[in-house]
Amino acid sequence: MDTKPPPRKDFCSLRYGLALIMHFSNFTMITQRVSLSIAIIAMVNSTQQHDPLNASTEQTLTDTLRHPSMSSKDFKTRASVYQWSPETQGIIFSSISYGIILTLIPSGYLAGIFGAKQMLGAGLLISSLLTLFTPLAADFGVILVIVIRTVQGMAQGMAWTGQFTIWAKWAPPLERSKLTSIAGSGAAFGSFIILCVGGLISQAFGWPFIFYIFGSIGCVCCLLWYTMIYDDPMHHPCISAREKEHIVSSLAQQPSSPRRSVPIKAMARCLPLWAIFTGFFSHFWLCTIIITYLPTYISTVLHVNMRDSGVLSSLPFVAAASCTILGGQLADFLLSRNFLSLISVRKLFSSLGLLLPSLCAVALPFVASSYMTTIILLILIPGTSNLCDSGFIINTLDVAPRYASFLMGISRGFGLIAGIVSSTTTGFLISQDSESGWKNVFFLSAAVNMFGLIFYLTFGQAEIQDWATETTLTRL
């Protein structure tokens, strides 16, 4: 007799609690990743020096640790300052991306076999511990910092890709945009927090405390993760029978054999997948530039101090977090009311997420003399860019839910390659001439975005592909 619709109070359900915990996890990982972008302003004596050695111009951190009675002010003033050249800094920045690339694909596949809970939890724990050790590593040499950042990237690669294995089992199709946007917005919110308070922490206590605080937060998040997260709703001890039935009945029946072949050849020939990969490449190209170089751009173009630079750099990520959540809500609203088809929603939000930030980026060099206009455009770029989270970012859940985590690893691999190339290219262009260099950076980013958008609009699909529905798969 009881034929009521699924739970009315969706936001009180366990799946939304999972989204919030994953939001906190993404918040933690991005703060640990971006911490160095803020701390390095205080860590280096001058960004214009070209001495590649790990020379310290003040008392080392190891000496400071021998004197625990030292005041925070003394600690701050005696924290090590290194003469790392811009080239050395670029290598340090990109090392975490190299580490993520190394584990994205294998961790995505292994998460589907052993469970995303263990993969993500282990990655988050390792990343948090390495964050705590970063200040000490800096005193031992730049090589050790690069090694730690690379291993930290490998740990974060394990954590990033495991999430989509969880959503393939927890997210009803009409709630995927909403749930993944809540979880994904943690990265934007984390960027806002670290950029906003990182400079304040550095000025008040010294740059090492940026790593100590956010590394400790990550350890707390690990405890929350291991105690409250389960790989699927069938095994969660606290889920209600009604919610469990709603999730299971709304998901298409998918084979879940722990030993399965991956149809690599079919994937390589699948243009809808290449459309997703191209979208990731374009999206990450500009996003990496904004995350990595935004404090530098604001301090050099707008000529503000470290504290104000951090606060201003954080504002764009308020818009990014808001647009991520609102975009997910709007996308699922359009789908639930049948206003647009699934592929139309994916292409609409992909178009907005690639076209709008491109227009803002192209306009930036022409309004550099206007402080307020520059800040507005810098706020709009990450905000509008994150509309892609309801577009091609989650499209793998539509075309191949069985391999969502594996394909997400490949997708992020394309994104990270774009990030490495764009960071290197940006450093080269602005080192030649700052004014014309930034103009070329933004024009090139817009061109990359337009290529990705055209390719996705042409070949993007939302139907489950034949090779992703077969019970018996061709061996690799």
Image (cartoon, grey):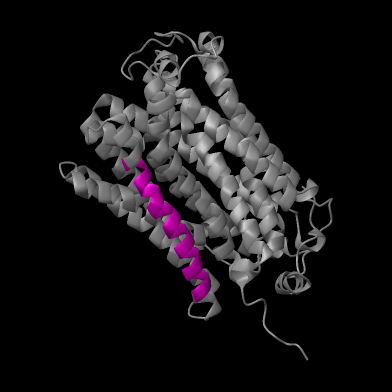
Horizontally, residue 118 falls left or right of residue 448, namely: right
Q: Is the magenta stretch mostly helix, strand or loop?
A: helix
Let me know if residue 196 is in the magenta part: no
Q: Most extreme residue toward the bottom, as rendered?
A: 1
Q: In this view, does 160 lie above or below 214?
A: below
Horizontally, residue 58 falls left or right of residue 255, namely: left
Residue 32 in view, yes or no = yes
Horizontally, residue 82 falls left or right of residue 97, namely: left
Q: In front here: 463 or 119? A: 119
Residue 104 in view, yes or no = no
Let me know if residue 327 is in the magenta part: yes
Tell me where residue 385 appears, x and y as whole percent.
41, 54
Which residues lie in the magenta part? Answer: 312-333
Q: In front here: 99 or 194? A: 194
Q: Most extreme residue toward the left, as rendered?
A: 369
Q: In front here: 213 or 371? A: 213
Tell me where residue 419 appears, x and y as whole percent.
46, 38
Tell me where residue 377 appears, x and y as whole percent.
27, 50
Quarter residue 133 falls in: top right
Q: Is residue 90 above or below residue 356?
A: above
Number of numbered discs overlaid on the protein picture: 0
Tell me where residue 211 appears, x and y as whole percent.
52, 29
Horizontally, residue 41 falls left or right of residue 152, namely: left
Q: In this view, does 418 lie above or below 175?
A: above
Quarter residue 217 falls in: top right
Q: In which quarter of the image is the N terminus?
A: bottom right
Q: Which residue is drawn at 47% across and 32% down?
A: 35
Q: Which residue is drawn at 77% across and 49% down?
A: 115
